[in-house]
Amino acid sequence: MSKTEETKVKKPVDQLKIAKIIAKEMPDLTLSQIQAIIQREQELTILAVCEGRRVVKKNYLTLYPLKVKAKTWKSPLNGEVYEIEEHTSIGVRLGEGFKARVGNKNMPRKMCRSVQRPTVA
């Protein structure tokens, strides 16, 4: 492998690229239908987190709201003090299936079934 191949940056995969891949795999759906499904899934995910609920995408990731307490902050640049109000941020936790799949290219494609669950004796 040449030095340029090693340092070559791969193009990011965006929402449209994912929709096009799905459209090739599922010819019964149009690209616009797939894009609408992806958009709606995103809207529902954001809505749930805004309502204070956790969103669990099994073995993939979990999104959850985080309450951040109010605080004061002093700028090291100009010495001014700022009051930061209480607000909600978002937490993201990667699922075990996702982490395991990234580390092992030979795992099955269905992440939900690829993680070994501990057995209870």
Image (tube, rainbow, N blue to C red):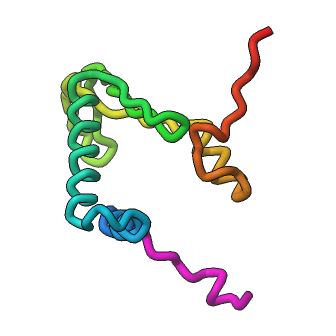
> Can you give x and y, in whole percent of width and height, for residue 75 in the image?
29, 40
Most foreground residue, 84 or 24: 24
Residue at the spot 36% in from the left edge and 25% down from the top edge: 54
x%, y% of residue 105?
70, 58
Query: What is the span of residues highlighted in magenta in the rendered image?
Result: 1-12
Which part of the image, by quadrant, shows the N terminus? bottom right
Point 80% across, 8% down: residue: 121
Is residue 73 rendered magenta in the image? no
Q: Is residue 100 left or right of residue 9?
A: right
Query: What's the residue at 23%, 26% (across, down)?
Result: 87
Query: Where residue 61 appears, x then y in whole percent?
Result: 48, 38
Question: Left or right: 6 with respect to 44?
Answer: right
Camera-side residue: 23 or 89? Answer: 23
Residue 25 visible? The answer is yes
- The residue sitting at the top extreme is 121
Q: Is residue 121 above or below residue 112?
A: above
Judged from this view, the residue extending furthest toward the front is 28
From the viewer's perspective, tell me whether residue 59 is left or right of residue 31. Answer: right
Q: Is residue 56 above or below residue 111?
A: above
Left/right of residue 49 with respect to residue 95 in the rendered view: left
Asked if one can make out residue 14 in the rendered structure from this viewpoint, the answer is: no
**Front residue (pair 53, 74):** 53
Q: Residue at x 25, y 29 (%)?
A: 48
In the picture, residue 57 is in which quadrant?
A: top left
Which quarter of the picture shows residue 86? top left
Figure disc tally: 0
State the image coordinates of residue 7 (x, y, percent, origin top left): 61, 81
* Viewer-proximal residue among 57 and 36: 36
Is residue 8 found inside the magenta-colored segment of the image? yes
